[in-house]
Amino acid sequence: MPHKIVVTLHGIRTRGQWQKQITPYLARHGLIPYHLDSPYLARHGLIPYHLDYGFFGVLSFVLPWTRATRVQWLRSELRDLMDRTGAKRVSIIAHSFGTWLALEVLEAENGNIRFDRVVLTGSIVRRDFPWGSTLLRKRWIQALRNERATGDWVVRAAELFSRLAGLVAPRAGASGAIGFNTACAGVHERHVAGGHSEVLNIANYDKWARFIAYPRLPDDHLRRVRMLVQQIRALAASQLGVDVELVRTNIFVPNANALRMIPGAWDNMTWAPEHDIELELDHGSTGRAFTDGTPFSIRRLGASWTAGVLPGPEQAKVNPRLQWVLSLPIGRLVTRSELTVAQDVIGVLNVDGLDSVPPLLQTPGDPTLKTLVFALWASTEKIRESLALANIGEPLHDD
């Protein structure tokens, strides 16, 4: 799984003490310190990069040329950082004016700089920001967590200034108090009571780190998911009448414009090259299940497969002993007109096997097989619950 660079941006009239305080929380979820002269340290996990554009007062915010200077500065910093590390995306944690800077850069770059996962706190980004139509669909950004305070008068003042000051005003809004105008998949609104600084509560730092780290799962979610995939593996082996040592389970989720395996969220996956498989959203059994929202299975017939062949470089990573794959989309199961589909799919659970194809899998229309597939599919609900919480940065709730 590619490493993640986390860029933090402070607000006006501050030097961002919180940027230093958050580093240990990022470290808990896989961070390795990064130094511009030591890129070899940046091979794994989350990498914090705390940007300081200096003390920026209210007058500087009001003047359009000083704002433009800071936007150009950030564009240059991010380009340089991505060139040095080879990263295709960076994640952002920003507060106040830093939120405005980050999104101004994203629009100005028109896709040349892309963000992975973004946390906005005390946001003054305009409320009609086009998340769905111009960002998420173009994949300029993967996911957003908007941490807002309902009593934040600072962001409301920024919106008022934007309306009254005309052409010299920034395109600002009270998204840090009221939220964004339209709901959009991938945009997650969270709120707290209080004012502009309450969103920088240290109690939130671990949640932000969890959100940025996804799909790498924190320990609480990983323990639960591993237990569940072990149970599903045992059930599949028992019902198919095969040795459990020949059955495997793994989970793929979208990550950096591809479907990738969640580290550690698997059972009996001992063929190391498979951990690096990258699938297009419609490739293979996994991709078909993800896009269609229904189970999809393939099996080997001699030297070929019944369907879902992967591109050459990815097919070469597959365990040569692999004989069959059953892919189950992880989402909310909905039944209409006797057809069950998964909605809001967030990943795919694969159950597969080595050395031979069980007789039951060789008769696709067998009612017993359909019953087994549905039983395995229904077992993904608790996995869905954990992934949904991890995806927004929330810890595991007690059952």
Image (cartoon, rainbow, N blue to C red):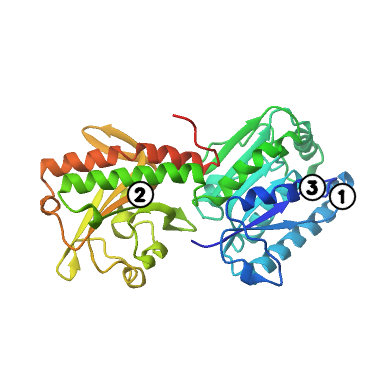
Q: Which residue corresponds to mark 3?
A: 17
Task: Name the residue nearer the viewer: 375 or 185.
Answer: 375
**Amino acid carrying mark 1 in the image:** Ser
- Please say whether residue 252 is visible from this viewpoint: no
Which picture quadrant has residue 287? bottom left
Left-right relation of 242 to 208: left
**Amino acid carrying mark 3 in the image:** Gln
Tell me the tag on residue 60: 1
Residue located at (16% from left, 61% from top) = 356
Q: Position of residue 89 (x, y in %)?
A: 58, 60
Residue located at (61% from left, 37% from top) = 180
Query: In which quadrant will I find the C terminus?
Result: top left
Q: Disc 2 vs disc 3: which is toward the camera? A: 3
Residue located at (39% from left, 64% from top) = 277
Few, some or many C-alpha atoms within 10 Å of disc 1 (few <14, some 14-19, many ≥20)? some
Q: Secondary structure at mark 1?
A: helix
Q: Which residue corresponds to mark 2?
A: 348
Q: Disc 3 vs disc 1: which is toward the camera? A: 3
**Amino acid carrying mark 2 in the image:** Val
